[in-house]
Amino acid sequence: MSDISKRKLKLKVSAIKEGTVIDHIPAPFLFKVIAILGLDKIKNQITFGTNLESVKLGSKAIIKVSDKFFRNDEINKIALIAPHANLNIIKNYEVVEKKIVEIPNEIKGIVKCINPQCITNHEKVTTCFKVVATNPISLKCKYCEKLTIGEQIRIQ
Amino acid sequence: MKKDLISITDYSKEEYLKIMRLAAEFEENPDQDLLGGQVVATLFFEPSTRTRLSFETAINRLGGKIIGIADPGSSSAAKGESLHDSIRMVSQYANLIVMRHPLDGAARYAAEVSPVPVINAGDGSNQHPTQTLLDMYSILKTQGTLDNLNIFMVGDLKYGRTVHSLLMAMSAFKNPIFNFISPAELQMPNEYKIYLREKNIRYFEHREFSDIISEADIIYMTRVQKERFSDPIEYEQVKNAYVLRNAMLEKTKPNLRILHPLPRVNEIHTDVDTNEKAYYFNQALNGVYTREAIIAHTMNLK
Ligand SMILES: [Zn+2]
């Protein structure tokens, strides 16, 4: 990240000492990202900004979580709705590591199957999808074998 | 690990060939007491007399005992018991479960829940792999090979699960050519066309059911169902445009055989029935041998 954008970032949302900054979240999905990562259920200090200008996304959101470092499999869950998100790992106010989210090969839970006749929409079954394409994201249901694609993706 | 059969792609090409070989063996000698009194549950959560009779005949010929739901309306599922609980209960009584269910994906889920193997006898609009294997056996029997065949699929190619599964299974063999004949609103879904393109398999799409069938080795007919159309007038037009009549078979290849998963409505005119190229009634009988083969394979008896 350039010095200018670093400064910008500080301007918009206050800095944290230790933790993770998740940037480039599409603004409409901020609260879904919060839910998927379970940030609404933890006691850590969290600040977020939304409807920030972004060249890439139009408007973006940013989340800062103090004293929290995500495992890859945890953070990759948001790849479905925030494929351009990136992470800055902060130690002592400095960015010590940068990560981009990656779409996992398999998505367990999180997404609802588009097919109303799918068993997962009738009985308590944890959904499970194979990611068969990434642009647009195409998910193949392990149970009914139907595809849920791009815009059709609904977070449970 | 137990060998469930949920989706046609659960089997490898070697397994397809093994089932073909066993089906031929059972056709020679259908009564073999391989199950030796083991109990098979036939759980039909929706009625399908044809498939149930075929399975139950296969189980009887293998010396198995059958427990099952006779009338889905009176079953525990109708009383609100979850599929999960039904399967947990039945899997304690039976050595094998054969299941048909109206919901897509129900069979895969049942296989996860059940400690005994599950054979899918149809899950909603999703999969019906034993039908596909009996179709393959019918093709092998009539053509002497599963390689280099020109397969025509006619009618409802959008919702017809049997054509989708057959397409995937036949793609495992050498140089198939597919010809799809359907109205635009019922054409082969993109995902299957992509599947064929990725495997470099040739396919052609046609709107008209015409003399192009002179190239066919197999014509696989399907039902065009009224409920697939929002406009009833459109249905009436389509229904009559995709009917196979005896006169159309005049210039076709001598080895051509006509398959249909049955029951038919009007898509094959009764004047075809006496033509030697009509194979759909024999096809149904092949189902018993194929299902014997599948059960023997699933239970590690052959
Ligand atoms: Zn599904």
Image (cartoon, rainbow, N blue to C red):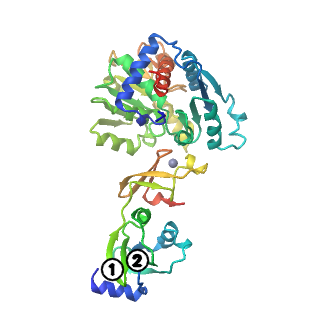
Q: Position of residue B207 (x, y in %)?
A: 39, 36
Q: Position of residue B135 (x, y in %)?
A: 43, 25
Tell me, yes or no, whether the two marked residues, 1 and 2, touch with CB atoms within 8 Å: yes
- Residue B262's disc number: none
Q: Which residue is mark 1?
A: A95
- The foreground one among B277 and A106 is A106
Depth check, mark 1 against mark 2: the one in front is 1
Q: Position of residue B133 (x, y in %)?
A: 44, 26
* Disc 1 from disc 2: Cα separation: 9 Å
- Residue A21's disc number: 2
Amino acid type at image mark 1? Val
At 49% from the left and 68% from the top, the residue drawn is A37
At 55% from the left and 15% from the top, the residue drawn is B61
At 42% from the left and 36% from the top, the residue drawn is B10
Question: Which picture quadrant has residue B195?
Answer: top left
Seen from this angle, which residue lies furthest top?
B28
Q: Secondary structure at mark 2?
A: strand
Give the answer, above or below, for where A19 lies relative to A35.
below
At 29% from the left and 39% from the top, the residue drawn is B199
Amino acid type at image mark 2? Val
Question: Which picture quadrant has residue B164?
Answer: top left
Give the answer, above or below, for where B118 lies relative to A66.
above
Could you tell me how many numbered marks the image carries? 2
Q: Which chain is mark 1 on?
A: A
Q: In which quadrant is the C terminus of chain B drawn?
A: top left
Characterize the local packing of mark 1: few (<14), some (14-19) or many (20 or more) Cα atoms within 10 angstroms: some
